[in-house]
Structures are given as C-alpha cells and as structure tokens.
Amino acid sequence: MAKFPELVFSGVQPTGNLHLGNYLGALKRFVEMQKTHPCIYCVVDLHAMTMPHDPATLRRTTREVTAAFLACGIDPKKNAVFNQSRVAEHAELAWVLDCVARLGWLNRMTQFKEKAGKDRENASVGLYNYPVLMAADILLYRATHVPVGEDQKQHLELARDIAQKFNNDFAAGIAERGYGDGFFPLPEPLIQGPATRVMSLRDGSKKMSKSDPSEYSLIALTDDPDAIANKIRKAKTDPGALPSEVEGLAGRPEADNLVGIYAALADESRTEVLARFGGGQFSAFKTALAELTVARLAPIRAEMLRLNADPAHVDSVLAEGARKAREIAQPNMDAVKDIVGLIR
Ligand code: AQP
C-alpha cells in the first residue's frame, strides 16, 4: 500500500454538553496529537441531525463544542477547526461512499441498534447512514490517524473496509492517475490511554453519554467545582476497599471506572494510582479524585464560559477553519469524481 503523509482527523457531535468521557477519550488526545501531527478537528453538525433536534439548539451547541475545543487547548491557527456542514464535500463524498459500502456491513453497526432502540422502523435514514458519513469525514482528507474513544472502534473498522473496497473497485483508474495502489489510506484508530471508555457514574455497565437523562451520570465540562465534587461523592461504588493491584478491579466496573478517570487526569497508569490509594476507603479516594478533576477542569470551564460569551470570535474560527479544510477537501473530491467517472 502506498505511503500517505500522516494526518489526523477527528470529530465531535454538537448534541449537548460535552462531558469527562468526551474529554478523556477524545479532546485531551486531540490536544496531544497537535504537538506531533497536522490535525483537522471538526464539529460534526450533520451527524447531530441524525436524531430529532431543535435548530436553535444545534446552532448553540455547535458554537459551544467549538468553544470546548479551543478551551481544551486546540490551536485553531495550527489546525483546521470547523463545522462539517460548511464543507459541502463531506456530504458529497458520503454519497459516493454510500454506493461503495454494503448493506450487510451497516446492518452490523451496534451504535445504530443502540440509538434506534426498539422502534427501528422509525429511526431516520441518516442515523442508519451515520457511519458512512463518518467514513467520508475521515477519507475526504485522506487522514491516516483518528483519535477516538472505544465506542467508535467499529465505525473506524467500517471506514477502513470502505476505503479498501473503493481502492479495489477503482484500482485501474487510481493507478492510471498516479495514485499507486490506493487513493485512500486505511485510517488507523488511536484508542489509547486509561480512559478510552469512561462509564456512567451511576451505572458502571453504561458509557458516560451526553444523551443520558440522569445529570448525575456525567461530569460536564461546564460543571462548577461544587457540582463536580457532589457528583463524584454520589458516584456508585461497591462496599469493598480499593485494591492494591489492577487485577483486583476485575468484576468491579464502578471502581475500575473511577480509578481509570483518576489515572487519565493524572497522566498515570492504574497501577500507579492503586499503589497510592490501594487498601484505602472509597471516600478518601473520591475526595482526591474530586480535587484532581476540579483542578483539571476549572481552567477549561472558565475559558469555555468566556468563549460562549463571544460567539463572534467562535464564528470567525469556524469560518477560517472551513476555508483551510476546503483547500484539502476540494481537490480530493475532484479526484474522487474523476476516479469514479463523474464529469466535472
Ligand atoms: N464515555 C466515553 N468515554 C470515552 N470516550 C468517549 N467518547 C464519547 N463518549 C465517551 C468519545 O468522544 C468523541 C465524541 O463523541 P461524539 O459526540 O461524536 O459521539 P458519541 O460517541 O455518541 O458520544 P456521546 O457522549 O455518547 O454522545 P451522544 O449521547 O450524543 O451519542 C468520540 O471520539 C467518542 O468516542
């Protein structure tokens, strides 16, 4: 397979208040990646339309997620930060890839099953098609690396399958145009660190999710210190003491979750965290976890609140980011059209 220049792409849906899971699984990693790679970070507003939505709320949350990106430390001068719908090629490539992806592949997607629930016939076609649009987001830039949380692993595998099938189906045209044995790279998921799947604080078997109706299930990036401390104090645990070894966390999802959160926030391993807190009571550990969470999130919250009060600045970042993104997206989309036989 041809060697592609390394490029990072990832996106976040503006479907509500971002939470600690989004931060540890995605945003914190985005900030780290920008030190070593060119990066494109997208607020995926088209994805946010796949579930019933309110237009005014979508506009507001698109700006808020952008504010969160900036507040976490993503540099919009160095990277492209924009909202997906502004670059029309995302939807255009999604159509081409719809014609490459197979129905059987989409039928296996577990996120669709979870989000559609029992009333599948009533789910939007967009929700079903979500993973193809996600593949288009990534492949439009011929991105090679995608930092995401564990829940997106299956969608990334699908994006790789679609890229591979496109490269095979149109191999002759791709080679003829000088792209060697593949136009699209097979994007690699980067699912790393101790908190790739942060669980609900109320139920260790469910992931922390923006759309969870229980506010005690998640820590929002905009929660104030009292709310954070209160939610951590009330977080579900089991009656045992904290183990001193990682093996002792097996079968204890709530304990494992809190230790994983601490480790990710402290940039330590679970082993290091347990070496310090193992054998002690949860109450003492929870106090330390609350202090650490507040220390890490307070500056992010302050900057988000400042940026939320300055929508003109946020809009200017999105406009400039879209301009940069189009510079890559348009020639790539032109090439795709040539390859598949669409006259431009
Ligand atoms: N609980 C989590 N732990 C670690 N990473 C997570 N991510 C989401 N939840 C967790 C990662 O955050 C990025 C953005 O997610 P998204 O907004 O695009 O969609 P999602 O995965 O569906 O997130 P939510 O919070 O559950 O939103 P809703 O409720 O709207 O569906 C992704 O990289 C994701 O892996």
Image (cartoon, grey):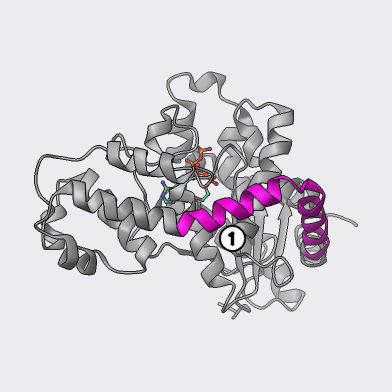
Q: What is the quadrant of the N terminus in the image?
A: bottom right
* Secondary-structure class at tag 1: helix
Residue, x 57% and y 77% (percent of image)? Answer: 35
**Can you identify the residue that label 1 sits on?**
163
Q: Percent x, y for residue 94?
A: 69, 48
Q: Position of residue 83 (x, y in %)?
A: 73, 50
Q: Which residues are magenta?
A: 296-324
Instruction: Quadrant for residue 292, please give it.
Output: bottom left
Residue 39 vertical position relative to residue 233 in the rendered view, above or below? below
The residue positioned 36% from the left and 49% from the top of the image is 198
| Quarter of the image where the C terminus is located | bottom right
287 or 105: nearer the eye? 287
> x, y (%) of residue 139?
64, 60
| Residue 285 or residue 179, whichever sits in front | 285
Please give the name of the residue rendered at 50% of the width and 54% of the height, measured from the top-left corner.
298
Q: Is residue 322 magenta?
A: yes
> On the picture, is 340 further left or further right than 282?
right
